[in-house]
Image (spheres, grey):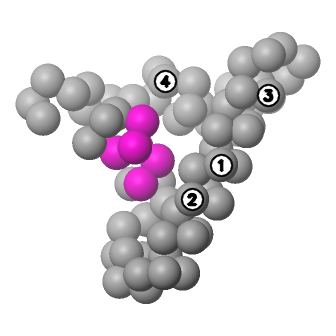
Amino acid sequence: MDVYPKIVSNFPMFYTSDEKELLRGSPMFEHITNEIKEITEEYNSIVSAVPQFKKFTLDEYIKNKNLGY
């Protein structure tokens, strides 16, 4: 786990809304938008099935999922 990056703000998935907006019209914008939507739906399904999972935020879930934790 120590080898995983501690700062992920440079990963497209974690760009700010303004940074993502700069990508509008490119395939990357659609890819990021779709990926976030799918992960959010997955997270919500898990929380519905296991309410205790809500102790982890969506942001934590996205970060851990994308870093391979």
Residue 15 image offset from top left, x and y in percent: 59, 31
Is residue 20 found left or right of 16 in the rendered image?
right
Q: CA distance from mark 2 to mark 3?
A: 18 Å
Main secondary-structure element of the magenta-colored stretch: helix
Circle 1 or circle 4, nearest the eye: 1
- The residue wearing badge 4 is 11
- The residue wearing badge 1 is 38
Circle 1 or circle 3, nearest the eye: 1
Asked whether residue 22 is in view, the answer is no
- The residue wearing badge 2 is 42
In the displayed structure, 41 sits above or below 46; it is: above
Upstream in the sequence, badge 1 or badge 3? Answer: 3
Disc 3 packing (10 Å; few <14; some 14–19; many ≥20): some
Q: CA distance from mark 1 to mark 3?
A: 12 Å
Upstream in the sequence, badge 1 or badge 4? Answer: 4
**Which part of the image, by quadrant, shows the N terminus?**
top left
Disc 1 packing (10 Å; few <14; some 14–19; many ≥20): few
Residue 39 image offset from top left, x and y in percent: 58, 50
Given the image, on which type of amino acid does mark 3 rest?
Glu
**Does the segment drawn in magenta span residue 4?**
no
In the displayed structure, 53 sits above or below 52; it is: above
- The residue wearing badge 3 is 30
Residue 24 image offset from top left, x and y in percent: 85, 23
Given the image, on which type of amino acid does mark 2 rest?
Glu
The magenta span reads 61-66
